[in-house]
Amino acid sequence: MSKRALISVSDKEGIVEFAKKIQELGWEIISTGGTKAVLEQEEIPNIAIDEVTGFPEMMDGRVKTLHPLIHGALLGRRDLDSHMKSMAEHHISPIDLVVVNLYPFKETLLAGGSQAEMIEKIDIGGPSMLRSAAKNHAAVTVVCDPMDYEKVEKELSADGETSLELRQQLAAKVFRHTASYDALIAQYLTEEFPVEDTKPEKLTLTYDLKQGMRYGENPQQSADFYESGLPTTYSIAQSHQLHGKELSYNNVRDADAALQIARDFDEPTVVALKHMNPCGIGTAKNIEQAWDYAYEADPVSIFGGIIVLNREVTEETAQKMSKIFLEIIIAPSYSKEALEILSKKKNIRLLTVDFSKKEQSEKEALVTGVLGGLLVQNQDVIVENPKEWTVATKVQPTDRQMEAMKFAWKAVKFVKSNGIIVTNDHQTLGVGPGQTNRVGSVKIALEATADKDALLQENAVLGSDAFFPFADNIDEIAKAGIKAIVQPGGSVRDQEVIEACDKYGIAMVFTGLRHFRH
């Protein structure tokens, strides 16, 4: 008796060639609906599923394979006499090969399918057959990915059957596949049918391997890059690399941080970033001038940095960038001349990202791994209205200082806590990130300012991501000559800080919101 294969696929890629091969090897093929039509068109002999079950496909294909004559043929253990006796008594012929892939739920969702369309793309029979076959992998070969056709063909051609090792690997792949498929459905239905003020009792996330990496943060750590099951267009995962070697683990993290900063600016802006912190942000009327501001903000730290430009890279800007070593440049596009100039640098990576989709990227939750669990939060993308800020001091900020404060407040949100930033209205001047006390961050930001005279200008301001706990911070700021501060407020010592500002003639604005970034 010839062995039987059941083929029922939504993705028809490679299925004709695979079916022809196994048919030539003497396998009998059972098929369903659209798959049967494709095989018949190629004159590949096959049996309709309803000929096996004696029951017609019905309900628009919702019911066709959910039958004991199918699942018994998949689940029956060949090494147990009781199972084989039951199969014989009920006229169940074993199925030894299952080739199934599922309704295109993800593809339909990405294409904007309606709720009714999405419900119909929830596959029931397909996952059931895959799971039955995978459970019985001791005897059944199960294939859910066209990429595996070749290795199955190779073993069948050589030995007439597949090895247990291959069947085990394919079974594990099936359960990864169905788990991911169900995770997307669960995510979609949870969003479609939310329960007010109730968190889902289970969090099911799914990711697809984007690329393997040589190592993680350090050479002794292994790492891989996975992309969200439902891709985010404005992301490093969906970027297109035009030049250079593969990104490293640290490259990906830095590039992601730089993209998040650039997302907050609409005017021509250049962001320079090192080790998850901005070292230069410049805005201007054109991208070349914005580059000049970002570079001049910290010409030392920018060396080996990650650069994001939110406008096309021009020839003039490329000429300037090509003069220093940069790890990565990300932009919406490059002029022909700019790409030619920058591509001459062997070690630089050049990428493009679709900036038109940046607002959609704000909806994605942020997931952080901890030992034994995950932390999940929405992104810090609240829209603030500076008109609602309050001036806490007797001294009122000037219009130029207010514009600088708006810039500083956008920028400090992306500085690791405790975060301090010194800016004017178009350029960062000094950054003080990640210290265990705020006065330390203040000192670093002030000392990092290359042009100390810039601190004395009217539009030089200082921003703090959280409140000042002590007035000693103000003492340091006053020594440097800064005349305006923007901070959240909310400390029990706010009054002491306000009095210190009044003493030094410094204007201070409270925003009412903090922006910790751990």
Image: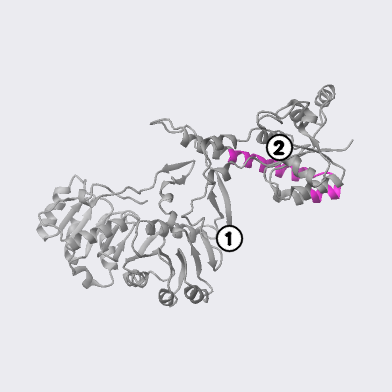
What is the distance, in whole Å, between disc 2 and disc 1 at their CAs?
Answer: 32 Å
Q: Which residues are magenta?
A: 152-181
Examine the image and state in which quarter residue 133 appears.
top right
Q: Residue at x 52, y 46 (%)?
A: 230
Inspect the image, locate mark 1, and give the three-letter code of the amino acid beneath it.
Arg
Q: Residue at x 75, y 45 (%)?
A: 166
| Quadrant location, the N terminus | top right
Asked whether residue 386 is in view, the answer is yes
Residue 355 lies left or right of residue 214; in this view the side is left
Q: Is residue 237 above or below residue 425?
A: above
Among numbered discs 2 and 1, the one appearing first in the sequence:
2
Residue 197 lies left or right of residue 81; in this view the side is left
Residue 341 lies left or right of residue 124; in this view the side is left
Give the camera-side residue of 269 and 133.
269
Check if residue 3 falls in the magenta segment.
no
Mark 1 lies on a secondary structure that is loop
Asked whether residue 163 is in view, the answer is no
Is the stretch drawn in magenta largely helix, strand or loop? helix
- Characterize the local packing of mark 1: few (<14), some (14-19) or many (20 or more) Cα atoms within 10 angstroms: some
Check if residue 169 falls in the magenta segment.
yes
Q: Residue at x 63, y 40 (%)?
A: 103
Residue underneath mark 1: 214
Inspect the image, locate mark 2, and give the three-letter code of the amino acid beneath it.
Ala
Give the camera-side residue of 437 and 6.
6
Q: Is residue 170 above or below residue 87?
A: below
